[in-house]
Amino acid sequence: MAKYVLAYSGGLDTSVILKWLQITHGADVVTVTANLGQRRELVGVQAKALACGASAAYLEDLQQEFVEQYIWPALKAGALYQGVYPMATALGRPLIAKRLVEIAREVKADAIVHGCTGKGNDQVRFEVSIAALAPDLTCVAPLRTWELHSREEEIAWARAHHIPVSATQKSPYSIDENLWGMSIEAGPLEDPWAEPPADCWQLTVDPDQAPAKPAVVTIEFEHGVPVRLDGEVLAPVELVARLGELAAAHGVGRIDMVEDRLVGIKSREVYEAPAAVALHAARQALEQLTLDRETRRVLANMGQELARVIYDGLWFTPVREAIGAFVDSATHVLSGEVQLKLHRGRATAVGRRSPHALYDPSLATYGDGDTFNHQSARGFIEVFGLAARIASGKRRAQQVKAPQPGVEEVLV
Ligand code: ARG
């Protein structure tokens, strides 16, 4: 009998897959449910898997590893896909894949099964991660191949096979959640012109209804990673959870975007990522204070590259490791404190300080105590502007018209 390890969320798709594998493939199915800090009740998930015929049901608490090994490296780099998406879903997939592979080895499974559709990014992330970690294991994706072509057909199939269908499964939205944020798609969100309906938001208070009085939280970073909130040392999971709650109460973290999927489809997605949005804002404020301009420029490029690598499911690759090494080096001095104001949907840095600050008041001041040598600016500008001066002179000599409007007038 073939043995399959199924990535099991307890939702409709994976519950139907669990039963379907037994009926159509005669398979022995072991389920693995990852706890990445989603609020969904997970205790009942194991019992549900066993009731649906799983031969074993694993529930894996991966929260700490998720924050320390996946979220922190992305945060340090300032990695936001297409400049905005903090990638809660994309960061969780490689970790789930890693645990699936470990359990597949333990139970000597023949294949790993997931419930991703054939038009999303997650199938790619799971399968590329599994291929990198265990090239010999095959992947099965029933949603790409089976005969159930709609949600209604799946619900009917579930009922016919005595699989409980919960009320939340009637929601028009497709939701993926973990500690770093919530990804919400489908239903009324498929019209990119339509404002997201109030009922699509699951975590955050409507910014218009949020308290008029802002909250100011002090976040301390060490080497690019947050370690304290308002002076209190917190474990990584606790820190993200606490800050997330506070930011959500102030309406921080709503993102509405049209996103380019790896498979070529544009899709309208909304996200709620209160802790992620707050921490990225704070990190950026500290970066401004502590990193020199060139390091910031290259780090910004690396952050974009890393976002793309993560989004595309290439976590277990040499390029991700190499970018990580650069980011660790560049952010070694990213230590210090940021005061972050949370107010009606916005997270704004209002203060920053660091033992590594490159900010020098005696150079910056317009008041007394200015130590900047104003005379030296003249020579600097002369050399800095030399190439521009030479190019301009050449054009004049050759009567070449410069392409930009406005410059032409200068030439006559
Ligand atoms: N578009 C996001 C990503 O590719 C989220 C995908 C999962 N979303 C969902 N609602 N199931 O990372």
Image (cartoon, rainbow, N blue to C red):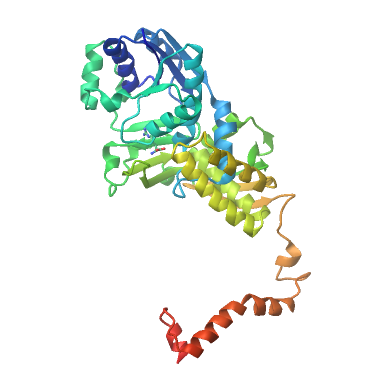
- Residue 54 lies left or right of residue 295; in this view the side is left
Q: Nearer the viewer, residue 293 or 61?
A: 293
Q: Is residue 98 above or below residue 318?
A: above
**x and y, in percent, of residue 138 in the image:** 40, 22
**x and y, in percent, of residue 225 in the image:** 63, 40
Location of residue 390 (image quadrant): bottom right
Residue 122 seen in the current view: yes
The residue at 54%/41% (across/down) is 319
The residue at 63%/55% (across/down) is 295
**x and y, in percent, of residue 278 in the image:** 54, 43
Q: How many marks?
A: 0
The residue at 22%/17% (across/down) is 157
Residue 218 seen in the current view: no
Q: Nearer the viewer, residue 85 or 96?
A: 96
Q: Is residue 35 above or below residue 259?
A: above
Q: Quadrant of ligand 1?
A: top left
